[in-house]
Image: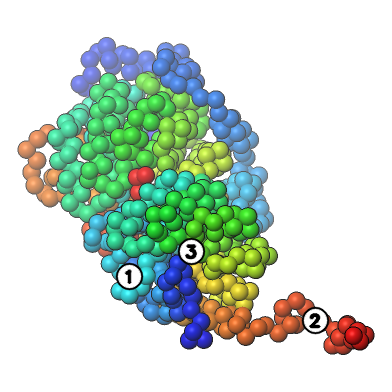
Amino acid sequence: MQNDKLIIGGHEFQSRFILGSGKYSLNLIEAAVRDAGAELITLAVRRANTKEQENILDYIPKGVTLLPNTSGARNAEEAVRIARLARELGCGNFVKIEIMRDSKYLLPDNAETIKATEILAKEGFVVMPYMYPDLNVARDLVNAGAASIMPLASPIGSNKGLATREFIQILIDEIDLPIIVDAGIGRPSQACEAMEMGAAAIMANTALATAGDLPLMAAAFRQAIEAGRKAYLSGLGRVLVRGASASDPLTGFLHD
Amino acid sequence: MENQFFVDSEHLSPAALARKHQLETEPASRTNHMEYLPGMEQIDSEVCARVMEQMNTYDYSQYTAKDVKAALEHERCSIEDFKALLSPAAEPFLEQLAQKARLETRKHFGNTVYLFTPLYIANYCENYCVYCGFNCYNHINRMKLTTEQIEHEMKIIADSGMEEILLLTGESQAKSDIRYIGEACKLARKYFRMVGLEIYPVNTEDYRYLHECGADYVTVFQETYDTKRYEELHLLGHKRIWPYRFDAQERALRGGMRGVAFSALLGLSDFRKDALASALHVYYLQRKYPQAEMSLSCPRLRPIINNEQINPLDVHEKQLCQILCAYRIFLPFVGITVSSRESAEFRNGIVKIAATKVSAGVSTGIGDHESKYTGKESDSTEGDEQFEINDSRSFDTMYRDIAEQGLQPVLNDYLYV
């Protein structure tokens, strides 16, 4: 397990839990990061665009890699501008592309996301696009230079779990980049299930923000993600994988 | 009980007084409030017809406890469910509404509460809206800030820590023209991260210009969706034209604004119908402009200078809370703003349930931030206030009060792109 690293754009991470920093009190961020064991934390550039006394950046512990997101962008051009601003603000080279043309469900715009990925990858960003799980789009994102693919499990904030399970499985099977399940994961058991399927990591925010004890929930997610990862690496029993199979070999009649 | 809105000022000339009385007592002396005036842009939109059809056929007395229980159990709130939640039958279920509303608020906004403050830059007005302190027949100190005065006010507000500002004027195109408001927006961009506008409705091109000057949110209160009642309350001026006001948000979005805000002024007419129409105005416009950010306010009538008696009639705090919970359950993604018209206690309670934005350090007067914020005697004149506020907490106090309730005050969550 020690050698089981998550590699994104050449950067190695031990943790497979990417933590969100929105929707909860800034003074809980440190405890959440600690108990989640997170090495990557997202932050909305629009939230960081503030005066010093309230800057979310000041609440993020040192040593954690920042993953600024482009929330608020309605098209590729706006996402590119926000990503560049994130770099100017000292947030590093990672960027999670979020482009929404829908204020109700906050569903990502796949077409604009491909465009932004191409531009930002060429500018040297480690681009992690949030997307609706579509295999063709995922392939386009690979070709555009994405460092990982972040398909949504269900609508953001819904805590509904793996509504797009079958399509995420296809991405895991067909795409060579890390598939990081993002949005809609509401409980540790859902995170565990995604990891058992072969997801490379889990990103969660609302599930923690709405928990009664945020750091405790962060710890629960950490353990669930680790358990799911171990299960995946161990090779799930065949009964679990695709249902029961006959105990006598079907091909026993073959002799030469 | 009706509000007694008509107040005669001794400062009015006999001719003005006669005209005022004529407008008040002779409906035939008033213009057609449904007819556009020259220069008013007419857009092709079906939103108004859809909202009005729903409102006109809404009979809230038909809904029963069974409908309310069903609405509370449904995972997604339909228009029918929303109508049940707004009905009198839902009043005994207020606590259940609040529980469900809180869950939705937390899912969509977490524990964040946004802070902003309004800045009135002028109080000249050409309308006669009988409930408003700025109305053209009300004797108040009128004022329009100069560019230097606007900047001075902005500096004082920005120094308090505030990062979002809402610029307001009275509705006078002559005294507060688009260029004047545009210059104020440019100045505001220097001092604040987010600039909203609450001014008289304008055409798409003017919204586009104001957006280029730095504004990105437009608030227009319809006051009441009941056109007949509207006609009785808005007796004179551009504001009298009801349909032009209705389409203001749509023109603002076409002009490039990121977001728009809506409200009825509760207490003017049948508040349940007005609440239904306000939310459906958001609902149908969001379907047409899915990228737009939407928010709802919920102002209730307040006393004004020269008329202390004005009140919100049958919209008590319980009813207001019911409306806000119903808004949240029906439109979980929209921002909900609760202004300083409401008491500190009400605002402290409602941010835990449904509201996502509150004002602080509020003055509805003109040019008086220095005296209000620092206690320093102003050496210049000040313009009178639009209405009496209730919650006068400063920015610092509001910030602390929100944090003490375990909520996260947010000063900015916005980028001008």
Whichever of labels 1 and 3 marks the residue nearer the N terminus, that label is 1
Q: Relative to residue B6, is residue B78 depicted above or below?
A: below
Q: CA separation, marks 1 and 3?
A: 23 Å
Q: Tell which circle, 3 or 2, labels the residue nearer the N-terminal end.
A: 3
| Mark 1 and mark 2 on one chain | yes
Q: Upstream in the sequence, badge 1 or badge 2? A: 1
Disc 1 designates what residue?
A60
> Looking at numbered disc 3 in the image, what kind of residue is underneath it?
Ala
Local secondary structure at mark 3: loop
Mark 2 crowdedness (10 Å alpha carbons): few <14, some 14-19, many ≥20: few
Image quarter of the N terminus of chain B = top left
Query: Who's the residue at 17% across and 39% down the image?
Result: B151
Packing grade of label 3 (10 A; few <14, some 14-19, many >=20) is: many
**Of the two numbered discs 1 and 3 in the rendering, the one whose residue sits closer to the viewer:** 3
Which residue is pictured at 37% across the width and 66% down the height? A66
Which numbered mark, 1 or 2, is in the foreground of this view? 2
Q: Looking at the image, how many numbered discs can be counted on the residues?
A: 3
Residue identified by numbered label 3: A147
Q: What's the chain of the residue with tag 1?
A: A
- Residue B112 is situated, as x and y percent measured from the top left of the image, at 39, 60
- The answer to whether residue B267 of the structure is visible from this angle is no
Residue occupying the point 42% across, 27% down: B204
Q: Which residue is mark 2?
A: A244
Q: Is residue B141 left or right of residue B340?
A: left
Quick one: A231 or B176, which is closer to the camera?
Answer: A231
Q: Please give the chain letter of the residue carrying mark 3.
A: A
Is residue A147 in view? yes
Q: Amino acid at mark 1?
A: Ile
| Discs 3, 2: same chain | yes
